[in-house]
Each structure stands twice: as C-alpha cells, then as structure tokens.
Image (cartoon, rainbow, N blue to C red):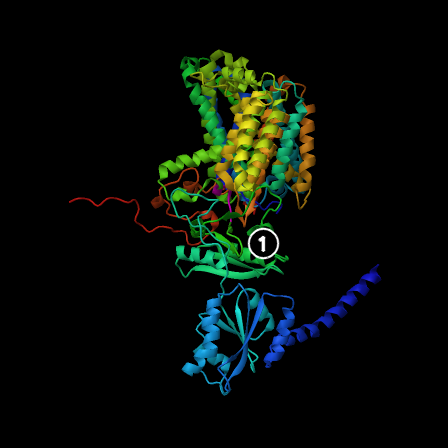
Amino acid sequence: MVKRLLQKTRLLGKNSKNVLPVSLEQTESKKLSKSLEKNLIKLKETFSGNSDVIFREFNIGVHNECVPAVIIFIDGMVNINIVNENIIKALMVDVRIAESIPLNGKKDLIAEIEKYALSAADSKEVNNSEEIIEGILSGDTILLVDGYDVSLKISARGWESRGVTESNTEAVVRGPREGYTETLRTNTVLLRRKIKSKDLIFEGMKIGRFTKTDVCIAYIRGIANEKIVDELKKRLSKIDIDGILESGYIEAFIEDSPFSIFPTIGNTEKPDITAAKLLEGRVAIFTDGTPIVLTLPYLFVETIQNSEDYYSRPWHITFIRWIRFSALISTVFLPAIYIAGQSYHHEMIPTSLLITMAAAREGIPFPVLVEIIIMAIIFEVLREAGVRMPKPVGQAVSIVGALVLGEAAVSAGIVSAPAVIVIAFTGISGFLIYSQNDSITIMRFFFIFLAGFAGLFGILLGVIFVLIHMAGLRSFGVPYLAPIATGTVGDLKDVVIRVPLWMMRNRPSMMGSKNIERLGAQGMPKPPKDE
Amino acid sequence: MLEDGKISNKQIIFLIITIITSTTILLFPSLVYKEAKQDSWMTLFFLMVFGIIVVYIITTLGLMFKDKTIIQYSEIIVGKVLGKILGIIYFVFFIHINAFIIREFSELLLSSFYPETPMLFFAIGIIIASTYAVRSGIEVIGRVSEVLFPIFIIVISGIVILAFKDMNFNNLIPILANGWAPVLKGTYYEFLLIGETIVLAMLIPYLNIPQKVRKSGIISIVSTCLLGILILGGIIAVFGEQTGYLRYPFLAVARYVSVAGIVERMDPLIMIIWIGGVFVKISVFHYCAVLALAQWLNIKDYRPLVLPVGGIMVVLSVILWENIAILSEQLTGIVIIPYLTIQVGIPVLLLIIAKLRKKER
C-alpha cells in the first residue's frame, strides 16, 4: 500500500517536471507571428466550424502602395456601422485621401494607425493569441496587419439587447421606475448615473470556464468595510465552474450557510435600491446576462424594508413597517395557530367565534391538519401556476383557482370556509415580504406540522429552534439578526420605526464602515423666521 | 478558550432578568404569600438588598480573575484538590437546579395546558431546544434572549395593566399587620431565586467588557425586583386571600383578565412567555453545567458533553420528585440551605481566602 503510494507520488513528480516545458512552449506558441498568413491560418483553425466568425481581408491603402490586413469579429456582436465607417473605410479610403499615415514601412504602422487613422474610441494593442480569441468572443474587433506581431483590439461592441424598462418584480408608486437589463455595462452605467463619485469602484473579473461571464463588484471606497470586500473577492476567486448563467450561481458559491433556509445574500433589480445599499456600506455584485444584482451583507431586517420607505413620509411608513411585520408573523404562523386552536386549545378562542367555527366544520370529512395542508398545497400550486403559465391562459387559472377550488370546495363540504379564509390571508400576507418568500413557505409547513403534533407548545419549540438558527447565522461576518439582537439600539431607527431622513445621522453601524456620518449638521428643517 | 463567543452587557442584563423572573412567576407567588400574606411585595425590597450584596461578592471575585470561571479560579484560590471538589459541587448544582426547572416547567404545561400528554415529552422537547442553543454557543443564547426579552416584558406588564380594573388595593392593607417576621421568612424563600445570579461567576469571562459587569448585575437585580413587586402586588390586589390556594397565581390573573369581552383568555400568552423565558433559563444553566464539566475535565471543546448532560437533566427531572407537591415543599425547605451555601457561601469564602492570600504576597 505504502509502496504504491510512493510510486504514485513519484509518478506525479515526473509529470510535474514534464508539464513545465510544455507550458513554456504553449506561451511561445500563443504569441503572434509576423506573417499575416500564419496568424490567419492559426486563428481560422481555432474558429473552425464557427460560421459566425467573420474574417474580412482587405488592403490598407489602394493599389500599388498597400499593406494586407484583416479584421476579425463575430457577426451580430459588433456595431456594423462602426466597423464599416470607422475601421474599414478609414483604413481603405481615408488613409489615401488624407495621406494620414505612411505606408512605406519605415514607421510602426500599428501605432500610426491607432494614432492617426482609426476613429474608434477604445482600442488596445494585443500580441497574445489567447487574448485575441477572448476579445473576439466578447464582441471586440481585431485588426491584424501583415508584417507585425501585434494586433489592435478595437471595441465596437453592439448587439441586440432589451432596453431599460420598468422593473417587474419591484414595483413602486413613488420612485424611479427603471430596472436593470441583461447587459453588464448598461447596468453599471445605471448605477454610475446615481452615484457620480470617483469612490464608486467597479472591479471586474471573469468567472466560468466556458461562459467566461463578466462579474463586477461594486462598492464605495471609504464607506464599504474593506474586510467584507476582501472576503468577497477571496470567495469569488475560489469559484471554479463551467458556467455562470445567473447571479444565483454566484450566490450559491459565496453564501455563508448554504444549507440554511434563509437567504444571506440579497438581490435587487433596481439601481436606486443598489445605490442606497452601497451608501449604507454594502457591496453589490453585477453579473453579465441577468438583471438581478446581488447585494451583501444581507440581514433579516431588509425583509421588511423597501425602497419606497425612504421616498415617502415617515409616519405612514412606520405604520406600514408594522403591517409588514404582522404580515410576516401571520403568513408563517396563522395556519399553525389555527390548527393549534382547533385541535388543542379551544379555550384560546372566544366562545362565540368557537361556535361559529365549529358550525362551519360540521360535516367536514378531514381533520383540521389535513384540511389546512390540502389548502396550503393548493395555494402553492396556484401560485406556481400563476408564475409559469403562458399569459393567455391566466384567466382560466384564476377562474379554476378562485371559483372551483375555493367556492365549490366549501359549498361541497370538502373543506371548511374558515380554512379557506386562513390560507387565503396567509398567502396574501406572504406577498408583502416577497424577498423571504422561499424561507417563509418552508417555515409555514414546518409550523403546520408542529402545531398538528403538539399544539402551541410545538409551535413555540419550533420558534425557539428557528430563532437559535437565525441568531447563529452570519452574512459576511455581520450577524443575520442585527440590529434586532445585537444590542445596537441606534440602528433600530430604521427597523421598528422609520425616523425622518434628517434624523438618520449615521449609517447602520453593523456594517462596520469607518465613515459613519451620513448627514451634515443642518438638523431639523425649519422655515425661515419672519422679521 | 473553550468558547470564543462574546455577549454584551445589555444581553447579560436581559439574561439575568429573564432567568430570575421566568420561574418567579411560576410557583413562588403563592409560596411567599403563605408566609408574608398581604406584605409579600415588601419581601422584594429585602431581596433587592440581598441581591446587590450577592452581585457585589460574585463580581468582585470574578473581576479578580477576569478570564476565568469559578471552576478555574477556585483551583487557584484553594488549591488543586479542594478546587476540584468545589468544581464538581458546582457541576452537580447546575444539573440539579436545571432538573428542578425542567420539572416545574413540565408540571405547569401538564396541569394547565396538556393534561393527557406524558411529562417526558415536554422535558425532552425543551432540552432538545436547549441542546441546540448550547451547542451554538453563549453568543447565540444572548441574542435569542435579546429577541425574546421585549415580548417577555410587554406580555407581563400588559397583563398586569389589563388586570388593573380588577384590582382591589384594600387587599394590600393592613401593612405589616404581623410585624416584620413573616416578611423576612418570605424573603428567605426567595433567596434561592436571587442566588441564581451565580451564573455570572461562569459568564464573566465571556463578556464584552467585564469591567462593567457589576453595574449590569445591579441593574438587573433592581429591575427584576421592581418587576417582581409589580407582579406580586398585582396578584395580591386581584385575588387577596385566595392567592395562597392557587398553584400558578399569575396564570390565574391572565385567565381572569377580560376587557370588554374581547380581550380575554390571555393564558396562551403566558404560555408563550413561560416557554420562552424558561427556555432561556434552562439553556443558560445547561450551558453553565456543560462548561463547568468541560473545564473541570480540562477538555478543549465542550460540545460533545452537551447532549449527555442534557439527558442526565431530563432523567433527574423525572425521577427526583414524585409530584409537584413534594417539589414545592423542597423548594421552601430542604434545598434552601445547600443552595445558598453554593450560591453565596462558597463565593464569600473564596473571596475571603483570595483577599488574604493577596495580602500575604
């Protein structure tokens, strides 16, 4: 056994020795050659079988005094007008007319082209074939010129994409409507237009062996806690996967507690929400190809916060906060409490209500627990159908759902009316706190079973379990229950109440940011005194 | 260190108030009433003084050895052998008191809410929760108590306020009709409760700022006693002479409350705060027991001990007492002297010896 192991290690050692020269050779072969023909053959070989890669061969200048060149790009990923006007026309025609560059080979032609002929905003010299291939695949245009082992990477990207439209998932009455799109650059621009500061940092990287997805970390230097940013970079750099198709892939790899039912990373579809979170010291992750931007650290209180809270006046919002909080409680506990009251604690329910409910349950064939579980599952089915179904059949689902399953089931005596009411209210309440929707659904069923098993005692034990679990959770080092359970009373100004904006002097302290002052010293706004 | 979590001074205040109050409102009101009658609420003033002295002793001792628990510094103060003996005494004490609490709690649920369920069910249920909490560390227990504390206080004071219209303050007079003796005897029963601040001797090393522990301890003692006056005074004002015949008078107050026929039957609320409060109490003592054992055995990680110790507590809670009557008889009789020795006597001795030794040097 030991011998075999030794042999293996020896073999490994040999392999590693072999690897080195090969990798050197590879880097050697990655360099461009001076001959255009050789370069072209190599690149065409690389892209063999790909019909969408265009090799456009032409001569710089006309007739006798000319240099062969080629531009390479992917059809559909470049703005064809720019390629036609500012690259091909500039090099073929304008060069001659304006005599802008010498074609006799005395000077460095590539540098001359970049300086005098090319009217494109972003270009870069590249001499590594791997970089060239990557550039082509990301939508850049590559210019190769005969006699030079350097190429020009010209950014003329342009493809069909969805425009900036109103966000569907986070609707507001008051506040900006625009939502993110699927293009990374559009999204970062949307954010940059909100925060015009040099301290807003976008750090890019590529993740995914095949997809090479652009991922971008955004934070405000000086406000964001550097430890969190460093930790995030460390976690991101560890991701090694074939493809990143949505920010959910990233979320799954950088979560603190992957097995928890609670999300420890938030997401949003709106630039104003992202901006507010960055200003509180959080960090955002933009992923190319999805309008969903991740924000972290994500704390439980963010469940009952909403962007519109800060655009409206404080009194009503404080009330709405409490409504949301009670909705959270009722969407998780109401069915369980109903079961506990019906099967264990009759004394809990006022007598007249008890009689009404008992009358409604007269002749129902199922026990309360089964009844509630059936209705809760039906609700989940309807909800899922509402999301997935093709739009035209929507009416059918609502008619079948509301009329047949609700009304008819009650009048047929299969389920009792109170059970339908309880589940309907539970479901509606759940929509108030949509960001916790997945954890809420699981908890709801968990408590339904506990209540059926041991009544109020079971529910309370369950609550204690969930509380212990939540108290132990962290999101990038920040306790998940902060600021409710971490003794930072000052931060409750934005949780149990929403104080006027001019009273929120400090950023939330739990993010650990050094720059804590949010306001100047103006204090309460007052009308000028008449004299 | 066995445990690297930290708790804030605010959390320790919440912990101590919850620990003491959650069982105060179970059996004690009627036990104290039997002795002190309408002056029961006055016992709490004496208790407050006694409590402050206890906190003073324990914190003075604890602050002399800031990063050590009583298990560790007793070995330093009185030597290895005696220290080990003291250590095992504390371990047994924590287990015994927790068995007491679990039994009280199960008996309450059994007699008032679930007459047909086996008692073991409640004991096992709460100890599983406590095991999970203790394994997650003292930091988590502190946070859970911080979430539960506001509910605890709102429900207790809410019930007392709602019961206000049913109160008859004539029940509270005549004041001191039988002199001071019954009041002092009532206080004597309650010493046990205030002695529970001994958990401080185990928790001081895990505080954020240990220097402030004395202030936190005194704040918690004073607020606990004020809360106790509110509860006891309220109960007596509502029930008067009947208080002595009720086993769980505060539960009875909650059942009695009725506002306009709509807000009534508050007893599920009592169940909520009792289960919450007792959970905190059980998990703190569970934690102390496990930590004591781990330090006594010099083990690096206390986690493997959590479940076995919890199991012992459940078994003891069932076999030690035949019924609730014996339990409450013990609570006002046989256990007071040994408990007080452990909670106050030993710390006083340790303090004296430690001071003398310091002078010698």
Q: Nearer the viewer, residue B193 or A466?
A: A466
Image coordinates for residue A524, horizontal then vertical, percent: 30, 44
Chain identifier of the residue bearing label 1 in the image: A
Q: Nearer the viewer, residue A421 or B158?
A: A421
Image coordinates for residue B216, horizontal then vertical, percent: 47, 37
Counting the numbered discs, the total is: 1
| Residue B29 visible in the shown view | no
Image vertical order of residue A497 relative to residue B31, above or below: below
Image vertical order of residue B115 relative to residue A514, above or below: above
Image coordinates for residue B268, horizontal then vertical, percent: 53, 23
Graded by Cα atoms within 10 Å as few (under 14), some (14 to 19) or many (20 or more), the crowding at tag 1 reads some
Q: Most extreme residue toward the top, as rendered?
A: B241
Q: Nearer the viewer, residue A160 or B83?
A: A160
The part of the image, by quadrant, that contains residue A309 is top left
| Residue A26 visible in the shown view | yes
Q: Tell me where the magenta segment starts and ends, as one range.
A: A297-302
Q: Quadrant of the C terminus of chain A?
A: top left
Image coordinates for residue A46, horizontal then vertical, percent: 64, 70
Q: Most extreme residue toward the left, as rendered?
A: A531
Residue that numbered label 1 is attached to: A245
Asked if the stretch drawn in magenta spans residue A301, the answer is: yes
Horizontal relation, residue A383 to residue B84: left or right: left
